[in-house]
Image (cartoon, coloured by chain):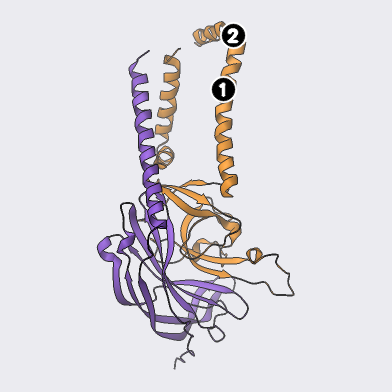
Chain colours: A purple, B orange
Amino acid sequence: MHTIFSRVNNVSAFLSSCLMSLVLAVAIASALYHTYQTPPAAGVVVNSIKVLPGKGRYLRKYRSRQQQEFAFVNFNLTADLSPLFHWNTKQLFLYVSAEYTDQQGTANEVVIWDRIVRRKEDANISSTFKNKYHLKDMSTTFRNAPPAHYTLKYNLMPYVGLLAWGEAARTSEPIPFPEPHQLA
Amino acid sequence: MFSDELKALRRLGFRHVLLQVLNFVQVLASGFMMWKGLGLITNTESPIVVVLSGSMEPAFYRGDLLFLTNPADQRYATGDITVYKIPGADIPIVHRVLETHDVVAKPDDYVAASPLAQPQLLLTKGDNNPVDDLDLYQGLEWLERRHIIGKVQAFLPYVGYVTIAMNDFPQLKYALLGGLGLLALIQRE
């Protein structure tokens, strides 16, 4: 009846159900904490935008690199995201995206910068940045593109449990794309 | 060789063997039902996936378990972590959405019943990769909803490593199966 096998079986089953309920409690507590938390204070200000012509990536459809306009954005971020660090925060994924709806009605959202924040000490950001990723319009030119909003968003990634997303800041006014620079 | 086992079977009787088979089938069927039921609720073909590559490190490592949903009434947004499968590729990929373009069809083309019926073009990138996924799309220019299995909603570390270990070291699989079989033989109740 009370063989070693059944004892080991009982103990390991008990331990694993304890562990599972602990994990569940942590996940629920941190999800509740996040829903009732005041959103973090942050600001994003665009300093300058330049539009330059260049060559895009090689596409199999065209069998070549197409002529394409690229926007270069210089922006300022001020954000204190340290309140988002709690007992179940593994890291924050911060990203800045440009959002605009063009005349055809296509809603575009393009991430131009991102950063992974792993420590609470690094969550206080106040600095100037340039875009890390290409900002280009699907029509290859920004000539008809309307002004764009720039937003700072975050993705909270936990040690265990639910992931959370949120918007920390947004430019107050949409910022127009300038006329493209001509390269000599 | 198996005469002892055969004798034991004969002593237990045909009905008992059938009952054992029924129990076994029931366990299999209820597992399958739970998996498919979860798939129905979350609207995805595989609601739980194991991370197989390091392209989302340091967020997700090999062997972490991800829980997916794919709500039909929601669009994907930048920053969402999606699991997608390109036709012709053999394994699904877990990467983050970098660009979304919610296209509106031309008026003379067709009239969509709702904004959600309009196509959405996506570009993804792994957090740990230096460039976006265009080269992984096998000639596609954009990812679309039909390629996407789901969005990552929850995370459980390490648990999926068992399956990876069993794939990487087949000996482990046979050892585990053999061990279980031996236990089943020894434990006569």
Disc number for residue A105? none
Which chain's residue wears label 1?
Answer: B
- Give whichever of A43, B22 is nearer the camera: A43
The chain identifier of the residue carrying mark 2 reads B
Where residue B84 sits in the image (x, y, percent)?
53, 56
Quadrant assignment, res A35? bottom left
Q: Residues within 10 Å of mark 1 (few under 14, many from 20)?
A: few
Dividing the picture into quadrants, the one containing residue A113 is bottom left
Give x and y (percent) for residue B153.
Answer: 47, 53
At a point 35% along the width and 50% down the height, the residue shown is A159
Residue count near mark 2 (Cα–Cα under 10 Å), binned few <14, some 14–19, many ≥20 = few
> In the orientation shown, which residue stands out farthest toward the bottom?
A184
Q: In whole angstroms, how far apart are the C-alphas of marks 2 and 1?
A: 16 Å
* Percent x, y of residue A1: 38, 12
SS of the residue under disc 2: loop
User: Who's the residue at 55% across and 28% down the image?
Assistant: B27
Image check: B48 left or right of B106?
left
Q: Amino acid type of disc 2? A: Gly
- Residue A30 lies, in percent from the top left, at 37, 51
- Say which of marks 2 and 1 sits in front: 1
The residue lying furthest to the left in this view is A121
Which sits in the foreground, A173 or A106?
Answer: A173
Q: Earlier in the sequence, mark 2 or mark 1?
A: 2
Determine which residue is flagged by label 2. B13
Residue under the image location 39 percent in, 56 percent down: A34
Q: Which mark is residue B23?
A: 1
Is label 1 in a helix, a strand or a loop?
helix
Amino acid type at mark 1: Asn
